[in-house]
Image (cartoon, rainbow, N blue to C red):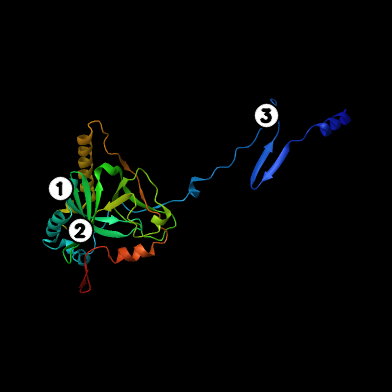
Amino acid sequence: MMADQEQHLESAPAPDVSFEGVKLSINSENENGGTVQLPPETDSVENLPSPVVGEKETRPLPPVIQEGFFAGKSGRLEEAVDQCQKSVVDGNIDGTVQGVWLLTEIDHWDNEHERVILLTQKTILTVRYNFVSCKVKDARRILFQDIDSLQKGLFEYPEKTFVMPRNGTGLRINWGKGRDIGFFEMWNPMADSIPYLTLASHPLQHSAQDSSSYKIDAFETALVQAVNQFRQEQNASSPSLPVSEAPLKTDIIFGMHSAVFNQSRLGFSRERGGVSF
């Protein structure tokens, strides 16, 4: 009897066992002729990259730095608005001006620039204005009919970035129907074909008497109303402007240029050690 059992064990097929890396997979046929296999290991959530995100609220700058912004000096912003309306606004293209803000533009290299923003009946006008010489440097026009969507949220950077994350909420105005940024556009700091505009509050929001003129939230509210009104006038059945809340991603790893540029506030009209520019 023992001999018959040994002979039966020797003739029975053994299951296939395979070792791949650290995973153990045992294949054997069950009663229905199928294959039984252990489930593969899954990646832990803890191992996924964690992006770097700034804080929701911004902190006031020291008084000595706040006072250095020429835009905050008496009458400078009013004079800038007057000059922009005379030299930039085209009534046939833009319509009438609905509101004016002084905000911060963040380009695709994460550099901060001071901008006078004029919201009209049909367009957004972003103006580079020199508050020291009181002159319009250049301007850019964004038509309401080209705007696809708005996105607001905190600023997000890659996990291994060397950039100090920017605090505060930003607003990204998208057009180009979701077109991705090309390779040469991404690596050209002077590229003017980027299909979006990113804005944030101006540092003067913490010290100005009329702080709403420097805050991105006030501009966003007025922009949504203006664009939706424009769409209704063009077509009564037009949908409202899509507005989403999601982090504003910036693919900057090293960011040495933007770190020096922003820390020195070279994108703002300021007095710098007796020299104003």
Q: Residue at x 15, y 47 (%)?
A: 91
Q: Is residue 157 visible?
A: yes
The CA distance from mark 2 to mark 3 is: 71 Å
Specify few, some or many for label 2: CA neighbours under 10 Å numbering under 14, 14-19, or 20 or more.
many
Specify few, some or many for label 3: CA neighbours under 10 Å numbering under 14, 14-19, or 20 or more.
few
- Residue 115 position within the rendered picture, expressed as x and y whole percent measured from the top left: 23, 57
The CA distance from mark 1 to mark 3 is: 76 Å
Q: Is residue 41 left or right of residue 130?
A: right
Helix, strand, or loop for circle 2?
Answer: helix
Between disc 1 and disc 3, whose residue precedes?
3
Q: Residue at x 55, y 42 (%)?
A: 42
Q: Is residue 36 left or right of residue 198?
A: right
Q: Is residue 11 left or right of residue 261?
A: right
Q: Amino acid at mark 2?
A: Leu
Q: Is the residue 26 above or below the residue 87 in the image?
A: above
Q: Amino acid at mark 1?
A: Gly
Q: Which mark is residue 34?
A: 3
User: Label 1: which residue?
Assistant: 91
Q: Looking at this rendering, what residue extends furthest in the front direction? A: 92
User: Label 2: which residue?
Assistant: 204
